[in-house]
Amino acid sequence: MLSGAGTAGVYLLATALFLIFAVGYMAMSRRSKTASGLIAFIVKGLGIRAGVAASYVTLLTYVAVLSSLYGIHAVFLQQAAIELFGLDLPWGFWAVVTLAILTPLSYNRVEFSARIMGVLLVLAVAAILVLDVSILFQGGAGGSFSFEGFSPQLVFGPGIGLAALFALGSFVGVESTPVFSEEVRTPQKTIPRATYITIAALGIFYVFSTFMVSNAVGGDKILTVATENPTGFILDVAGAYVGPVWVKILNILVVTSFFAILLGFANVMSRYVFALGRAGILPAAFGRSHKKHQSPHIGSIVTAITVLVVIGAFILAGADPFHQLYAWLIAVGTLGVLLLMCASSLSVVTYFRKTDERENVWTALVAPAIAFTAFAVAIILTVLNFSFLAGGEGLAEWLWVLVPIAAIIGLVVRASQGKRELSFEDIN
Protein backbone atom coordinates (compact mmCIF):
# COMPACT_ATOMS: atom_id res chain seq x y z
CA MET A 1 0.00 0.00 0.00
CA LEU A 2 2.96 2.31 -0.67
CA SER A 3 0.80 4.43 -2.99
CA GLY A 4 -2.03 4.59 -0.46
CA ALA A 5 -5.35 4.79 -2.26
CA GLY A 6 -3.50 4.61 -5.61
CA THR A 7 -2.34 1.04 -5.00
CA ALA A 8 -5.20 -0.46 -7.02
CA GLY A 9 -4.16 1.65 -10.01
CA VAL A 10 -0.54 0.56 -9.61
CA TYR A 11 -1.63 -3.10 -9.67
CA LEU A 12 -3.61 -2.39 -12.82
CA LEU A 13 -0.45 -1.06 -14.48
CA ALA A 14 1.56 -4.08 -13.27
CA THR A 15 -1.05 -6.44 -14.74
CA ALA A 16 -0.89 -4.68 -18.09
CA LEU A 17 2.92 -4.90 -18.10
CA PHE A 18 2.93 -8.63 -17.38
CA LEU A 19 0.36 -9.26 -20.11
CA ILE A 20 2.60 -7.36 -22.55
CA PHE A 21 5.63 -9.33 -21.34
CA ALA A 22 3.72 -12.58 -21.88
CA VAL A 23 3.20 -11.84 -25.60
CA GLY A 24 6.84 -12.38 -26.58
CA TYR A 25 7.50 -14.85 -23.79
CA MET A 26 4.73 -17.17 -24.97
CA ALA A 27 5.93 -16.87 -28.56
CA MET A 28 9.22 -18.34 -27.34
CA SER A 29 7.45 -21.04 -25.31
CA ARG A 30 5.80 -22.32 -28.50
CA ARG A 31 9.29 -22.93 -29.86
CA SER A 32 10.71 -24.72 -26.85
CA LYS A 33 9.41 -27.67 -24.84
CA THR A 34 11.73 -27.92 -21.88
CA ALA A 35 11.74 -27.74 -18.10
CA SER A 36 14.46 -25.08 -18.40
CA GLY A 37 11.74 -22.48 -19.01
CA LEU A 38 13.00 -18.94 -19.45
CA ILE A 39 16.64 -20.10 -19.29
CA ALA A 40 16.17 -21.94 -22.59
CA PHE A 41 14.57 -18.82 -24.08
CA ILE A 42 17.53 -16.68 -23.03
CA VAL A 43 19.89 -19.22 -24.60
CA LYS A 44 17.95 -19.02 -27.87
CA GLY A 45 18.15 -15.26 -28.02
CA LEU A 46 21.33 -14.24 -26.17
CA GLY A 47 23.55 -17.31 -26.35
CA ILE A 48 24.82 -20.07 -24.08
CA ARG A 49 26.94 -17.86 -21.81
CA ALA A 50 23.99 -15.62 -21.02
CA GLY A 51 21.93 -18.76 -20.45
CA VAL A 52 24.35 -20.20 -17.90
CA ALA A 53 24.54 -16.83 -16.12
CA ALA A 54 20.74 -16.75 -16.07
CA SER A 55 20.73 -20.28 -14.64
CA TYR A 56 22.62 -19.21 -11.54
CA VAL A 57 20.51 -16.07 -11.15
CA THR A 58 17.42 -18.27 -11.37
CA LEU A 59 18.68 -20.62 -8.68
CA LEU A 60 19.51 -17.70 -6.38
CA THR A 61 16.14 -16.11 -7.09
CA TYR A 62 14.10 -19.16 -6.22
CA VAL A 63 16.16 -19.99 -3.15
CA ALA A 64 15.63 -16.42 -1.94
CA VAL A 65 11.90 -16.31 -2.69
CA LEU A 66 11.21 -19.77 -1.31
CA SER A 67 13.21 -19.14 1.87
CA SER A 68 11.55 -15.75 2.38
CA LEU A 69 8.10 -17.29 2.08
CA TYR A 70 8.97 -19.80 4.78
CA GLY A 71 9.63 -16.81 7.02
CA ILE A 72 6.29 -15.10 6.51
CA HIS A 73 4.42 -18.43 6.53
CA ALA A 74 5.99 -19.25 9.90
CA VAL A 75 4.85 -15.87 11.26
CA PHE A 76 1.23 -16.45 10.30
CA LEU A 77 1.33 -20.09 11.45
CA GLN A 78 2.80 -19.07 14.80
CA GLN A 79 0.11 -16.40 15.27
CA ALA A 80 -2.68 -18.81 14.28
CA ALA A 81 -1.42 -21.49 16.67
CA ILE A 82 -1.40 -19.00 19.55
CA GLU A 83 -4.81 -17.52 18.81
CA LEU A 84 -6.63 -20.75 17.97
CA PHE A 85 -4.96 -23.28 20.25
CA GLY A 86 -2.92 -21.27 22.75
CA LEU A 87 0.18 -23.06 21.45
CA ASP A 88 3.20 -20.75 21.60
CA LEU A 89 6.18 -22.26 19.78
CA PRO A 90 9.11 -20.54 18.03
CA TRP A 91 8.67 -19.57 14.38
CA GLY A 92 11.66 -21.73 13.47
CA PHE A 93 9.82 -24.83 14.67
CA TRP A 94 6.90 -24.09 12.37
CA ALA A 95 9.19 -23.37 9.41
CA VAL A 96 11.01 -26.70 9.76
CA VAL A 97 7.77 -28.66 10.28
CA THR A 98 6.30 -27.08 7.14
CA LEU A 99 9.41 -28.01 5.15
CA ALA A 100 9.19 -31.60 6.40
CA ILE A 101 5.54 -31.87 5.33
CA LEU A 102 5.94 -30.11 2.02
CA THR A 103 9.02 -31.86 0.62
CA PRO A 104 7.49 -35.34 0.09
CA LEU A 105 4.65 -33.79 -1.93
CA SER A 106 7.14 -32.75 -4.61
CA TYR A 107 7.90 -36.42 -5.31
CA ASN A 108 4.67 -36.79 -7.25
CA ARG A 109 3.87 -35.46 -10.69
CA VAL A 110 2.75 -31.86 -10.92
CA GLU A 111 -0.92 -32.88 -11.25
CA PHE A 112 -0.94 -34.22 -7.67
CA SER A 113 0.46 -31.12 -5.99
CA ALA A 114 -1.54 -28.90 -8.36
CA ARG A 115 -4.76 -30.35 -6.93
CA ILE A 116 -3.62 -29.52 -3.40
CA MET A 117 -2.49 -26.02 -4.37
CA GLY A 118 -5.68 -25.42 -6.33
CA VAL A 119 -8.00 -26.30 -3.45
CA LEU A 120 -6.06 -24.30 -0.85
CA LEU A 121 -5.70 -21.21 -3.02
CA VAL A 122 -9.33 -21.27 -4.14
CA LEU A 123 -10.44 -21.37 -0.51
CA ALA A 124 -8.15 -18.45 0.39
CA VAL A 125 -9.27 -16.36 -2.59
CA ALA A 126 -12.90 -17.13 -1.79
CA ALA A 127 -12.39 -15.94 1.80
CA ILE A 128 -10.88 -12.65 0.63
CA LEU A 129 -13.68 -12.22 -1.92
CA VAL A 130 -16.24 -12.66 0.87
CA LEU A 131 -14.54 -9.76 2.63
CA ASP A 132 -14.48 -7.74 -0.61
CA VAL A 133 -18.18 -8.34 -1.23
CA SER A 134 -19.01 -7.42 2.39
CA ILE A 135 -17.20 -4.11 1.92
CA LEU A 136 -18.96 -3.65 -1.43
CA PHE A 137 -22.45 -3.99 0.10
CA GLN A 138 -21.71 -2.11 3.32
CA GLY A 139 -19.91 0.77 1.66
CA GLY A 140 -16.49 2.23 2.29
CA ALA A 141 -15.21 4.07 5.33
CA GLY A 142 -17.29 7.13 4.45
CA GLY A 143 -20.34 5.17 3.35
CA SER A 144 -19.41 5.41 -0.33
CA PHE A 145 -16.63 4.41 -2.71
CA SER A 146 -13.97 6.62 -4.17
CA PHE A 147 -12.34 5.85 -7.53
CA GLU A 148 -9.63 8.42 -7.05
CA GLY A 149 -7.20 5.50 -6.55
CA PHE A 150 -7.15 5.14 -10.34
CA SER A 151 -6.42 8.81 -10.96
CA PRO A 152 -3.03 9.65 -12.48
CA GLN A 153 -2.31 12.00 -9.55
CA LEU A 154 -2.38 9.14 -7.04
CA VAL A 155 -1.13 6.30 -9.24
CA PHE A 156 1.90 8.30 -10.39
CA GLY A 157 2.40 10.01 -7.06
CA PRO A 158 5.62 10.11 -4.99
CA GLY A 159 5.36 6.43 -4.04
CA ILE A 160 4.93 5.06 -7.57
CA GLY A 161 8.46 3.65 -7.85
CA LEU A 162 8.41 1.54 -4.70
CA ALA A 163 4.73 0.68 -5.05
CA ALA A 164 5.34 -0.58 -8.59
CA LEU A 165 8.15 -2.81 -7.35
CA PHE A 166 5.91 -4.37 -4.72
CA ALA A 167 3.14 -4.81 -7.29
CA LEU A 168 5.54 -6.45 -9.75
CA GLY A 169 6.83 -8.68 -6.95
CA SER A 170 3.28 -9.92 -6.37
CA PHE A 171 3.39 -11.55 -9.80
CA VAL A 172 6.60 -13.48 -9.11
CA GLY A 173 6.04 -17.04 -10.31
CA VAL A 174 3.88 -16.37 -13.37
CA GLU A 175 7.01 -16.55 -15.54
CA SER A 176 7.54 -20.16 -14.46
CA THR A 177 4.68 -21.84 -16.35
CA PRO A 178 6.95 -23.12 -19.19
CA VAL A 179 8.87 -25.10 -16.55
CA PHE A 180 6.00 -27.61 -16.57
CA SER A 181 5.88 -27.93 -20.37
CA GLU A 182 7.24 -31.50 -20.29
CA GLU A 183 4.49 -32.60 -17.91
CA VAL A 184 1.44 -31.52 -19.90
CA ARG A 185 0.07 -33.15 -23.06
CA THR A 186 -0.24 -30.10 -25.32
CA PRO A 187 2.27 -27.50 -24.05
CA GLN A 188 1.95 -25.24 -27.12
CA LYS A 189 -1.68 -24.59 -26.19
CA THR A 190 -1.80 -25.27 -22.47
CA ILE A 191 1.19 -23.17 -21.33
CA PRO A 192 0.23 -19.89 -23.09
CA ARG A 193 -3.40 -20.27 -22.01
CA ALA A 194 -2.41 -20.97 -18.40
CA THR A 195 -0.03 -18.00 -18.38
CA TYR A 196 -2.52 -15.46 -19.70
CA ILE A 197 -5.31 -16.74 -17.44
CA THR A 198 -3.01 -16.66 -14.39
CA ILE A 199 -1.85 -13.09 -15.04
CA ALA A 200 -5.37 -11.83 -15.76
CA ALA A 201 -6.91 -13.60 -12.76
CA LEU A 202 -4.20 -12.37 -10.39
CA GLY A 203 -4.47 -8.86 -11.76
CA ILE A 204 -8.25 -8.69 -11.37
CA PHE A 205 -8.03 -10.12 -7.86
CA TYR A 206 -5.28 -7.72 -6.74
CA VAL A 207 -6.97 -4.64 -8.24
CA PHE A 208 -10.42 -5.45 -6.87
CA SER A 209 -9.20 -6.45 -3.40
CA THR A 210 -6.83 -3.49 -2.93
CA PHE A 211 -9.57 -1.15 -4.13
CA MET A 212 -12.06 -2.57 -1.63
CA VAL A 213 -9.66 -2.68 1.33
CA SER A 214 -8.43 0.83 0.59
CA ASN A 215 -12.00 2.13 0.63
CA ALA A 216 -12.80 0.16 3.78
CA VAL A 217 -9.97 1.80 5.69
CA GLY A 218 -10.13 5.13 3.91
CA GLY A 219 -7.87 6.43 1.19
CA ASP A 220 -6.33 8.98 3.52
CA LYS A 221 -5.55 6.35 6.20
CA ILE A 222 -4.63 3.18 4.33
CA LEU A 223 -0.92 3.96 3.97
CA THR A 224 -0.49 4.61 7.69
CA VAL A 225 -2.56 1.59 8.77
CA ALA A 226 -0.79 -0.82 6.42
CA THR A 227 2.62 0.45 7.48
CA GLU A 228 1.93 0.15 11.20
CA ASN A 229 0.42 -3.36 11.01
CA PRO A 230 1.51 -5.04 7.74
CA THR A 231 0.62 -8.62 8.77
CA GLY A 232 -2.60 -7.94 10.63
CA PHE A 233 -4.51 -4.98 9.21
CA ILE A 234 -6.47 -7.17 6.76
CA LEU A 235 -7.70 -9.25 9.70
CA ASP A 236 -8.76 -6.04 11.46
CA VAL A 237 -10.75 -5.05 8.38
CA ALA A 238 -12.32 -8.52 8.25
CA GLY A 239 -13.34 -8.24 11.89
CA ALA A 240 -15.00 -4.89 11.27
CA TYR A 241 -16.85 -5.83 8.07
CA VAL A 242 -17.57 -9.57 8.43
CA GLY A 243 -17.11 -10.49 12.08
CA PRO A 244 -14.81 -12.31 14.51
CA VAL A 245 -15.64 -15.77 13.15
CA TRP A 246 -14.38 -14.73 9.72
CA VAL A 247 -11.16 -13.48 11.29
CA LYS A 248 -10.51 -17.01 12.60
CA ILE A 249 -11.33 -18.49 9.21
CA LEU A 250 -8.98 -16.06 7.50
CA ASN A 251 -6.29 -16.90 10.04
CA ILE A 252 -6.44 -20.53 8.95
CA LEU A 253 -6.75 -19.83 5.23
CA VAL A 254 -3.82 -17.40 5.20
CA VAL A 255 -1.68 -20.21 6.61
CA THR A 256 -2.96 -22.81 4.14
CA SER A 257 -2.65 -20.44 1.18
CA PHE A 258 0.99 -19.76 2.01
CA PHE A 259 1.51 -23.53 2.24
CA ALA A 260 0.10 -23.82 -1.30
CA ILE A 261 2.36 -21.02 -2.54
CA LEU A 262 5.38 -22.67 -0.91
CA LEU A 263 4.49 -25.94 -2.62
CA GLY A 264 4.23 -24.19 -5.96
CA PHE A 265 7.61 -22.48 -5.67
CA ALA A 266 9.22 -25.70 -4.43
CA ASN A 267 7.87 -27.49 -7.51
CA VAL A 268 9.29 -24.81 -9.80
CA MET A 269 12.72 -24.78 -8.19
CA SER A 270 13.01 -28.57 -8.13
CA ARG A 271 12.29 -28.60 -11.86
CA TYR A 272 14.91 -25.96 -12.52
CA VAL A 273 17.44 -28.05 -10.56
CA PHE A 274 16.36 -31.08 -12.61
CA ALA A 275 16.68 -29.23 -15.93
CA LEU A 276 20.06 -27.72 -15.09
CA GLY A 277 21.39 -31.10 -13.97
CA ARG A 278 20.19 -32.60 -17.22
CA ALA A 279 21.72 -29.74 -19.21
CA GLY A 280 25.15 -30.22 -17.63
CA ILE A 281 25.27 -27.05 -15.53
CA LEU A 282 24.64 -28.86 -12.24
CA PRO A 283 25.73 -32.43 -11.35
CA ALA A 284 24.15 -34.97 -13.69
CA ALA A 285 22.50 -36.82 -10.77
CA PHE A 286 20.24 -33.78 -10.24
CA GLY A 287 18.77 -34.39 -13.70
CA ARG A 288 17.26 -37.76 -12.85
CA SER A 289 13.51 -38.25 -12.53
CA HIS A 290 11.56 -40.64 -10.32
CA LYS A 291 10.93 -43.98 -12.06
CA LYS A 292 7.32 -44.19 -10.89
CA HIS A 293 6.14 -40.57 -10.67
CA GLN A 294 8.44 -39.13 -13.36
CA SER A 295 8.98 -36.18 -11.02
CA PRO A 296 12.32 -34.44 -10.26
CA HIS A 297 12.63 -36.14 -6.87
CA ILE A 298 16.36 -35.47 -6.48
CA GLY A 299 15.74 -31.84 -7.37
CA SER A 300 13.12 -31.77 -4.62
CA ILE A 301 15.61 -33.09 -2.08
CA VAL A 302 18.28 -30.61 -3.19
CA THR A 303 15.73 -27.79 -2.95
CA ALA A 304 14.69 -28.83 0.56
CA ILE A 305 18.27 -29.11 1.83
CA THR A 306 19.21 -25.72 0.37
CA VAL A 307 16.20 -24.00 1.91
CA LEU A 308 16.85 -25.73 5.24
CA VAL A 309 20.40 -24.37 5.28
CA VAL A 310 19.20 -20.82 4.55
CA ILE A 311 16.34 -20.67 7.04
CA GLY A 312 18.45 -22.61 9.54
CA ALA A 313 21.07 -19.85 9.42
CA PHE A 314 18.42 -17.24 10.20
CA ILE A 315 17.00 -19.38 13.00
CA LEU A 316 20.41 -19.88 14.62
CA ALA A 317 21.14 -16.16 14.29
CA GLY A 318 17.94 -15.34 16.15
CA ALA A 319 16.70 -13.28 13.20
CA ASP A 320 13.24 -11.79 12.88
CA PRO A 321 11.25 -13.95 10.42
CA PHE A 322 9.34 -11.02 8.88
CA HIS A 323 11.64 -8.01 8.99
CA GLN A 324 14.80 -9.96 8.17
CA LEU A 325 14.25 -13.41 6.64
CA TYR A 326 11.21 -12.38 4.59
CA ALA A 327 12.00 -8.74 3.86
CA TRP A 328 15.67 -9.26 2.99
CA LEU A 329 15.26 -12.29 0.76
CA ILE A 330 12.04 -11.30 -1.02
CA ALA A 331 13.87 -8.13 -2.09
CA VAL A 332 16.71 -10.24 -3.52
CA GLY A 333 14.22 -12.54 -5.25
CA THR A 334 12.29 -9.63 -6.75
CA LEU A 335 15.47 -8.15 -8.23
CA GLY A 336 16.43 -11.55 -9.63
CA VAL A 337 13.05 -12.05 -11.31
CA LEU A 338 13.09 -8.55 -12.80
CA LEU A 339 16.56 -9.19 -14.26
CA LEU A 340 15.48 -12.54 -15.72
CA MET A 341 12.34 -11.09 -17.30
CA CYS A 342 14.32 -8.17 -18.67
CA ALA A 343 16.81 -10.59 -20.26
CA SER A 344 13.95 -12.76 -21.55
CA SER A 345 12.30 -9.78 -23.22
CA LEU A 346 15.57 -8.81 -24.87
CA SER A 347 16.11 -12.40 -26.02
CA VAL A 348 12.75 -12.38 -27.84
CA VAL A 349 13.81 -9.38 -29.92
CA THR A 350 17.27 -10.77 -30.72
CA TYR A 351 15.92 -14.26 -31.51
CA PHE A 352 13.45 -13.10 -34.13
CA ARG A 353 15.95 -10.67 -35.63
CA LYS A 354 18.51 -13.43 -36.28
CA THR A 355 16.12 -16.16 -37.45
CA ASP A 356 13.84 -16.58 -40.43
CA GLU A 357 10.86 -17.56 -38.30
CA ARG A 358 7.89 -15.31 -38.88
CA GLU A 359 6.02 -13.41 -36.20
CA ASN A 360 4.07 -10.17 -36.36
CA VAL A 361 5.79 -6.93 -35.36
CA TRP A 362 3.82 -6.64 -32.11
CA THR A 363 4.90 -10.08 -30.91
CA ALA A 364 8.49 -10.05 -32.14
CA LEU A 365 9.46 -6.44 -31.45
CA VAL A 366 7.03 -3.95 -29.93
CA ALA A 367 5.68 -5.94 -26.94
CA PRO A 368 9.06 -7.36 -25.82
CA ALA A 369 10.72 -3.95 -26.31
CA ILE A 370 8.13 -2.30 -24.05
CA ALA A 371 8.59 -5.07 -21.46
CA PHE A 372 12.39 -4.80 -21.64
CA THR A 373 12.31 -1.04 -21.08
CA ALA A 374 9.84 -1.27 -18.18
CA PHE A 375 11.76 -4.05 -16.42
CA ALA A 376 15.07 -2.23 -16.95
CA VAL A 377 13.62 0.85 -15.21
CA ALA A 378 12.28 -1.41 -12.43
CA ILE A 379 15.76 -2.90 -11.93
CA ILE A 380 17.29 0.55 -11.53
CA LEU A 381 14.57 1.54 -9.05
CA THR A 382 15.10 -1.67 -7.10
CA VAL A 383 18.83 -1.11 -6.69
CA LEU A 384 18.38 2.55 -5.78
CA ASN A 385 15.70 1.75 -3.19
CA PHE A 386 17.00 -1.60 -2.02
CA SER A 387 17.58 -0.59 1.61
CA PHE A 388 13.92 0.40 1.86
CA LEU A 389 12.70 -2.76 0.10
CA ALA A 390 14.85 -4.96 2.34
CA GLY A 391 13.65 -3.09 5.40
CA GLY A 392 17.05 -2.31 6.85
CA GLU A 393 20.50 -0.80 6.50
CA GLY A 394 24.00 -2.20 6.81
CA LEU A 395 24.16 -5.76 5.47
CA ALA A 396 20.57 -5.64 4.19
CA GLU A 397 21.09 -2.72 1.81
CA TRP A 398 23.95 -4.54 0.03
CA LEU A 399 22.25 -7.89 -0.48
CA TRP A 400 21.33 -6.87 -4.03
CA VAL A 401 24.92 -7.57 -5.07
CA LEU A 402 24.15 -11.30 -4.69
CA VAL A 403 22.27 -11.16 -8.01
CA PRO A 404 25.17 -9.89 -10.19
CA ILE A 405 27.53 -12.16 -8.24
CA ALA A 406 25.35 -15.15 -9.18
CA ALA A 407 25.50 -14.08 -12.84
CA ILE A 408 29.30 -13.73 -12.68
CA ILE A 409 29.59 -17.19 -11.13
CA GLY A 410 27.57 -18.52 -14.05
CA LEU A 411 29.91 -16.88 -16.54
CA VAL A 412 32.95 -18.33 -14.72
CA VAL A 413 31.40 -21.80 -14.70
CA ARG A 414 30.70 -21.56 -18.43
CA ALA A 415 34.25 -20.38 -19.13
CA SER A 416 35.64 -23.33 -17.18
CA GLN A 417 33.63 -25.73 -19.35
CA GLY A 418 35.46 -24.65 -22.48
CA LYS A 419 33.63 -25.74 -25.62
CA ARG A 420 31.56 -28.37 -23.83
CA GLU A 421 28.08 -28.52 -25.33
CA LEU A 422 25.10 -27.97 -23.09
CA SER A 423 21.54 -28.93 -23.96
CA PHE A 424 18.57 -26.98 -22.65
CA GLU A 425 16.17 -28.41 -25.18
CA ASP A 426 13.95 -31.42 -25.58
CA ILE A 427 15.28 -34.50 -23.86
CA ASN A 428 12.57 -37.10 -23.41
Image (cartoon, grey):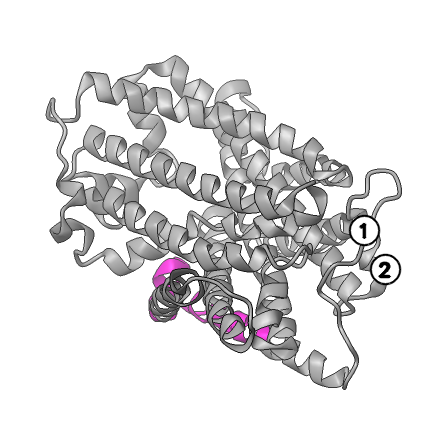
Q: Residue at x 63, y 29 (%)?
A: 116
Does residue 329 appear anywhere in the picture? no
Determine the residue positioned at 43% across, 60% down. Answer: 363
Q: What secondary structure is found at the residue carrying circle 2? A: helix
Indicate the position of residue 324 as horizontal and vertical percent values: 48, 54
Secondary-structure class at tag 1: helix
Left/right of residue 19 with respect to residue 267 in the rendered view: left
Q: Nearer the viewer, residue 158 or 68?
A: 158
Q: Residue at x 79, y 58 (%)?
A: 427
Within 10 Å of disc 2 (Cα), the crowding (few <14, some 14-19, many 20+) is few
Task: Give the image location of residue 207, x and y in percent.
Answer: 30, 38
Q: Is residue 306 left or right of residue 408?
A: right
Report the front residue among 3 and 112. Answer: 112
> As rendered, which of 277 and 33 lies closer to the eye?
33
Do the residues bearing badges 1 and 2 touch, measured as CB atoms within 8 Å?
yes
Q: Where's residue 333, x and y in %?
A: 51, 58
Q: Main secondary structure of the magenta part?
A: helix
Kindly identify the amino acid type of the residue bearing the numbered disc 2: Ala
Dividing the image into 4 quarters, which one contains the N terminus? top left
Looking at the rendering, the stretch of residues picked out in magenta corresponds to 383-407
Residue matched to label 1: 298
**What is the number of the mark on residue 64?**
none
Spot occupied by residue 41 in the image (x, y as percentages of width and height): 59, 65
Q: Is residue 385 above or below residue 254?
A: below
Say which label, 1 or 2, has the lower sequence index.
2
Q: Which residue is mark 2?
A: 285
Does 386 appear in magenta? yes
